[in-house]
Amino acid sequence: MTPTACATLTMVRSLASTVIFLLAAHASAQTCIAPSCFHADVVAVADGDTVTVLRQTAAGPRQVRVRLTEIDAPERGQPWGTRARQALADKVFRRTVLVAPSGEDRYGRLLARLQVDGRDVNRDMVREGHAWVYRRYATENWLPDEAVARDSGSGLWSLGVDASVPPWEWRRGAHQQRRKVATIDQSPSANSEAFSCGTKRYCREMASCAEARFHLVTCGVRTLDGDSDGWPCEKLCRRLR
Protein backbone atom coordinates (compact mmCIF):
# COMPACT_ATOMS: atom_id res chain seq x y z
CA MET A 1 0.00 0.00 0.00
CA THR A 2 1.36 3.40 -0.95
CA PRO A 3 1.96 6.08 1.72
CA THR A 4 -0.87 8.14 0.24
CA ALA A 5 -3.32 5.24 0.38
CA CYS A 6 -2.25 4.43 3.93
CA ALA A 7 -2.81 8.02 5.02
CA THR A 8 -6.21 8.05 3.34
CA LEU A 9 -7.23 4.82 5.08
CA THR A 10 -6.14 6.19 8.44
CA MET A 11 -8.17 9.35 7.86
CA VAL A 12 -11.26 7.35 6.89
CA ARG A 13 -10.96 5.17 9.99
CA SER A 14 -10.56 8.24 12.19
CA LEU A 15 -13.58 9.90 10.61
CA ALA A 16 -15.65 6.75 11.01
CA SER A 17 -14.71 6.50 14.68
CA THR A 18 -15.69 10.11 15.22
CA VAL A 19 -19.07 9.62 13.53
CA ILE A 20 -19.78 6.49 15.58
CA PHE A 21 -18.86 8.33 18.77
CA LEU A 22 -21.12 11.28 17.96
CA LEU A 23 -24.02 9.03 17.03
CA ALA A 24 -23.62 7.06 20.24
CA ALA A 25 -23.47 10.24 22.30
CA HIS A 26 -26.55 11.61 20.56
CA ALA A 27 -28.45 8.38 21.12
CA SER A 28 -27.51 8.20 24.79
CA ALA A 29 -28.55 11.83 25.28
CA GLN A 30 -31.98 11.08 23.84
CA THR A 31 -32.45 7.89 25.80
CA CYS A 32 -33.77 7.74 29.33
CA ILE A 33 -33.79 4.16 30.53
CA ALA A 34 -35.42 4.82 33.91
CA PRO A 35 -39.03 3.55 33.97
CA SER A 36 -40.14 6.86 35.46
CA CYS A 37 -39.10 8.85 32.38
CA PHE A 38 -41.84 10.24 30.18
CA HIS A 39 -42.53 12.66 27.34
CA ALA A 40 -44.69 15.72 27.95
CA ASP A 41 -45.57 19.08 26.43
CA VAL A 42 -44.39 22.23 28.19
CA VAL A 43 -47.41 24.50 28.70
CA ALA A 44 -45.95 27.16 31.02
CA VAL A 45 -42.59 28.55 32.13
CA ALA A 46 -42.61 30.14 35.59
CA ASP A 47 -38.97 31.21 35.74
CA GLY A 48 -35.52 30.07 34.68
CA ASP A 49 -35.73 26.70 36.43
CA THR A 50 -39.44 25.85 36.78
CA VAL A 51 -41.94 24.75 34.13
CA THR A 52 -45.35 23.13 33.92
CA VAL A 53 -45.80 20.17 31.59
CA LEU A 54 -48.89 18.38 30.35
CA ARG A 55 -48.43 14.66 30.83
CA GLN A 56 -50.65 12.06 29.22
CA THR A 57 -51.72 9.41 31.75
CA ALA A 58 -54.17 6.52 31.78
CA ALA A 59 -56.61 8.80 33.60
CA GLY A 60 -56.16 11.55 31.02
CA PRO A 61 -53.95 14.63 30.65
CA ARG A 62 -52.42 15.92 33.89
CA GLN A 63 -50.42 19.07 34.55
CA VAL A 64 -47.17 18.54 36.43
CA ARG A 65 -45.01 21.33 37.83
CA VAL A 66 -41.33 20.54 37.25
CA ARG A 67 -38.29 22.03 39.00
CA LEU A 68 -35.12 21.58 36.93
CA THR A 69 -32.43 19.83 38.95
CA GLU A 70 -28.74 20.69 39.27
CA ILE A 71 -29.30 24.40 38.56
CA ASP A 72 -30.57 27.56 40.23
CA ALA A 73 -31.66 30.41 37.97
CA PRO A 74 -32.04 34.06 39.01
CA GLU A 75 -35.32 34.89 40.72
CA ARG A 76 -37.87 37.02 38.89
CA GLY A 77 -37.00 40.08 40.96
CA GLN A 78 -33.28 39.49 40.56
CA PRO A 79 -31.05 40.81 37.75
CA TRP A 80 -31.32 38.52 34.71
CA GLY A 81 -34.38 36.77 36.16
CA THR A 82 -36.65 37.77 33.28
CA ARG A 83 -34.02 36.89 30.68
CA ALA A 84 -33.37 33.50 32.28
CA ARG A 85 -37.08 32.75 32.11
CA GLN A 86 -37.18 33.78 28.46
CA ALA A 87 -34.11 31.68 27.66
CA LEU A 88 -35.78 28.60 29.13
CA ALA A 89 -39.03 29.40 27.33
CA ASP A 90 -37.17 29.66 24.03
CA LYS A 91 -35.85 26.15 24.59
CA VAL A 92 -38.95 24.30 25.80
CA PHE A 93 -42.21 26.28 25.66
CA ARG A 94 -44.84 24.52 23.53
CA ARG A 95 -42.39 21.76 22.79
CA THR A 96 -42.33 18.08 23.70
CA VAL A 97 -39.61 17.29 26.20
CA LEU A 98 -38.23 14.12 27.72
CA VAL A 99 -38.60 14.33 31.49
CA ALA A 100 -36.17 12.34 33.66
CA PRO A 101 -37.48 12.59 37.24
CA SER A 102 -35.39 12.15 40.38
CA GLY A 103 -37.95 12.87 43.11
CA GLU A 104 -40.06 15.69 44.50
CA ASP A 105 -39.25 18.79 46.52
CA ARG A 106 -41.08 19.97 49.63
CA TYR A 107 -43.46 22.02 47.50
CA GLY A 108 -44.64 18.98 45.58
CA ARG A 109 -42.78 19.89 42.40
CA LEU A 110 -41.27 17.09 40.34
CA LEU A 111 -37.48 17.30 40.32
CA ALA A 112 -36.18 16.40 36.87
CA ARG A 113 -33.75 16.82 33.99
CA LEU A 114 -35.28 17.91 30.69
CA GLN A 115 -34.10 16.93 27.22
CA VAL A 116 -35.09 18.44 23.87
CA ASP A 117 -33.69 17.04 20.63
CA GLY A 118 -31.02 15.21 22.61
CA ARG A 119 -29.88 18.36 24.43
CA ASP A 120 -29.72 18.50 28.22
CA VAL A 121 -31.73 21.66 28.89
CA ASN A 122 -30.59 21.95 32.51
CA ARG A 123 -26.93 21.87 31.58
CA ASP A 124 -27.39 24.22 28.64
CA MET A 125 -28.89 26.83 30.97
CA VAL A 126 -25.61 26.79 32.91
CA ARG A 127 -23.43 26.67 29.80
CA GLU A 128 -25.16 29.70 28.32
CA GLY A 129 -24.97 31.73 31.51
CA HIS A 130 -28.65 31.70 32.45
CA ALA A 131 -28.24 29.77 35.71
CA TRP A 132 -25.79 28.77 38.43
CA VAL A 133 -24.86 25.25 39.39
CA TYR A 134 -26.96 24.61 42.50
CA ARG A 135 -24.10 23.69 44.83
CA ARG A 136 -26.28 22.42 47.65
CA TYR A 137 -28.07 19.79 45.57
CA ALA A 138 -25.74 19.19 42.63
CA THR A 139 -24.92 15.60 41.74
CA GLU A 140 -23.13 16.46 38.47
CA ASN A 141 -19.87 18.36 38.12
CA TRP A 142 -21.02 21.25 35.96
CA LEU A 143 -18.79 23.83 37.63
CA PRO A 144 -16.44 23.85 34.60
CA ASP A 145 -19.44 24.75 32.41
CA GLU A 146 -20.32 27.57 34.76
CA ALA A 147 -16.71 28.76 34.77
CA VAL A 148 -16.63 28.91 30.96
CA ALA A 149 -19.83 30.98 30.91
CA ARG A 150 -18.45 33.29 33.59
CA ASP A 151 -15.07 33.74 31.93
CA SER A 152 -16.69 34.50 28.57
CA GLY A 153 -19.17 36.94 30.09
CA SER A 154 -22.16 34.98 28.81
CA GLY A 155 -25.68 35.68 30.03
CA LEU A 156 -25.95 36.83 33.63
CA TRP A 157 -22.16 36.99 33.88
CA SER A 158 -22.25 40.05 31.63
CA LEU A 159 -23.82 41.97 34.53
CA GLY A 160 -20.61 42.26 36.51
CA VAL A 161 -21.07 42.74 40.24
CA ASP A 162 -24.79 41.91 40.13
CA ALA A 163 -23.96 38.41 38.94
CA SER A 164 -21.88 37.75 42.04
CA VAL A 165 -25.03 37.13 44.11
CA PRO A 166 -26.30 33.57 43.54
CA PRO A 167 -30.08 33.06 43.86
CA TRP A 168 -29.79 31.15 47.13
CA GLU A 169 -27.94 34.07 48.73
CA TRP A 170 -30.29 36.59 47.15
CA ARG A 171 -33.31 34.72 48.52
CA ARG A 172 -31.77 34.69 51.98
CA GLY A 173 -31.20 38.44 51.91
CA ALA A 174 -34.59 39.10 50.36
CA HIS A 175 -36.26 36.91 52.96
CA GLN A 176 -34.75 38.92 55.79
CA GLN A 177 -35.97 42.14 54.18
CA ARG A 178 -39.42 40.67 53.57
CA ARG A 179 -39.67 39.67 57.23
CA LYS A 180 -39.17 43.31 58.19
CA VAL A 181 -41.95 44.32 55.83
CA ALA A 182 -44.16 41.54 57.14
CA THR A 183 -43.99 42.95 60.67
CA ILE A 184 -46.32 45.72 59.50
CA ASP A 185 -49.15 43.23 59.74
CA GLN A 186 -47.96 41.39 62.83
CA SER A 187 -49.79 43.50 65.42
CA PRO A 188 -52.72 41.83 67.24
CA SER A 189 -55.18 44.30 65.75
CA ALA A 190 -53.95 43.65 62.23
CA ASN A 191 -53.56 39.88 62.33
CA SER A 192 -54.45 37.98 65.47
CA GLU A 193 -57.95 39.42 65.57
CA ALA A 194 -58.53 39.62 61.81
CA PHE A 195 -56.94 36.30 60.80
CA SER A 196 -56.51 32.89 62.35
CA CYS A 197 -54.65 29.73 61.42
CA GLY A 198 -56.97 27.13 60.00
CA THR A 199 -57.36 25.04 56.88
CA LYS A 200 -56.35 27.64 54.30
CA ARG A 201 -53.30 26.51 52.34
CA TYR A 202 -53.49 28.11 48.90
CA CYS A 203 -53.27 31.62 47.46
CA ARG A 204 -56.73 31.36 45.91
CA GLU A 205 -58.11 31.22 49.45
CA MET A 206 -56.44 34.49 50.51
CA ALA A 207 -58.33 37.78 50.37
CA SER A 208 -55.26 40.02 50.70
CA CYS A 209 -51.48 40.07 50.86
CA ALA A 210 -51.73 40.76 54.60
CA GLU A 211 -53.72 37.56 55.11
CA ALA A 212 -51.28 35.61 52.96
CA ARG A 213 -48.30 36.92 54.96
CA PHE A 214 -50.04 36.04 58.20
CA HIS A 215 -50.55 32.44 57.09
CA LEU A 216 -46.97 32.18 55.83
CA VAL A 217 -45.18 33.79 58.80
CA THR A 218 -47.49 32.95 61.71
CA CYS A 219 -49.05 29.69 60.58
CA GLY A 220 -46.08 28.37 58.62
CA VAL A 221 -48.06 27.57 55.46
CA ARG A 222 -45.10 27.14 53.10
CA THR A 223 -47.27 26.29 50.09
CA LEU A 224 -47.94 30.03 49.78
CA ASP A 225 -44.27 30.70 49.00
CA GLY A 226 -43.57 28.37 46.12
CA ASP A 227 -40.31 30.03 45.06
CA SER A 228 -38.96 30.40 48.62
CA ASP A 229 -38.24 34.11 48.23
CA GLY A 230 -40.00 35.13 51.45
CA TRP A 231 -43.03 36.57 49.66
CA PRO A 232 -46.31 34.65 49.60
CA CYS A 233 -48.79 34.74 46.73
CA GLU A 234 -46.91 36.73 44.10
CA LYS A 235 -50.02 38.17 42.42
CA LEU A 236 -51.48 39.46 45.69
CA CYS A 237 -48.23 40.91 46.99
CA ARG A 238 -46.63 42.07 43.76
CA ARG A 239 -47.43 45.76 44.30
CA LEU A 240 -45.66 45.71 47.68
CA ARG A 241 -42.40 44.34 46.34
Image (tube, rainbow, N blue to C red):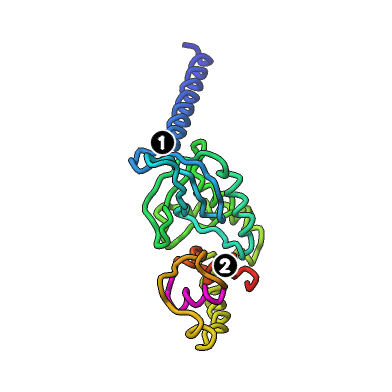
Q: Secondary structure at mark 1?
A: loop
Q: Residue at x 57, y 44 (%)?
A: 93
Q: Is residue 98 above or below residue 1?
A: below
Residue 169 in view in this figure:
no
Q: Residue at x 51, y 82 (%)?
A: 194
Q: Nearer the viewer, residue 201 or 218?
A: 201
Q: Quadrant of the C terminus?
A: bottom right
Q: Is residue 6 above or below residue 147?
A: above
Q: In the current view of this chain or complex, which residue is farthest to the bottom?
A: 188
- Quarter holding residue 170: bottom right
In the rendered image, residue 56, in percent from the top left (x then y), is placed at 43, 40
113 drawn magenta: no
In the rendered image, residue 157, in percent from the top left (x then y), is placed at 62, 58
Q: Identify the residue under disc 2.
A: 165
* C-alpha gap between disc 1 and disc 2: 35 Å
In the rendered image, residue 81, in percent from the top left (x then y), is placed at 61, 59
Which residues make up the magenta segment?
209-222
Q: Identify the residue under disc 1.
A: 31
Q: Nearer the viewer, residue 215 or 93?
A: 215
Q: Is residue 217 above or below residue 59?
A: below
